[in-house]
Image (cartoon, grey):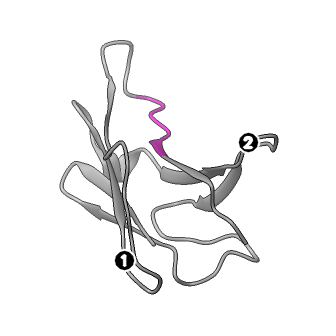
Amino acid sequence: MAWTVLFLGILAHGLGADSQIVMTQEPSLSVSPGGRVTFTCGLSSGSVTSNYPNSFQQTPGWAPGTIIYSRNTRPSGIPDRFSGSISGNKADLTI
């Protein structure tokens, strides 16, 4: 299965109008088969742990699909090579 484009986001509800999501991601990553890559997303204010980090797959022509929700829970059918973690005020998606 081709994982064409990935988006890591934080569902930032309940933080108020002044909160902003700050996305940190390399514009291009090259990984050898079997290698590991990590996408990071952080909040400029508020707490990641109280805002339900979620990761989504977006393939051109298809609706976004959830890869990780509630920190590190995978929906049925998502391989265990996908994992989520929280450290400080950042959430990571590791593949």
Residue 75, x across and y down, in percent:
70, 70
What's the residue at 50%, 39% (across, down)?
A: 11
Residue 91, x across and y down, in percent:
33, 55
What's the residue at 36%, 57% (across, down)?
A: 29
Q: In the displayed structure, does residue 74 sit left or right of residue 11?
A: right
Q: What is the three-letter code of the residue carrying label 1?
A: Arg
What's the residue at 53%, 54% (across, down)?
A: 55
Residue 7, x across and y down, in percent:
52, 46
Magenta-drawn segment:
8-14
Tell me the crowding category of disc 2: few under 14, some 14 to 19, or many 20 or more residues within 10 angstroms, Cα based. Answer: few
**Which quarter shows the C terminus?**
bottom left
Q: What is the three-letter code of the residue carrying label 2?
A: Pro
* Secondary structure under the numbered disc 2 in the rendered image: loop
Nearer the observer, 29 or 8: 29
Sequence-wise, the earlier of marks 2 and 1 is 1
* Secondary structure under the numbered disc 1 in the rendered image: loop
> Would you identify the image quadrant in which residue 12 lies?
top left
Q: Which residue is mark 2?
A: 60
Residue 36's tag is 1
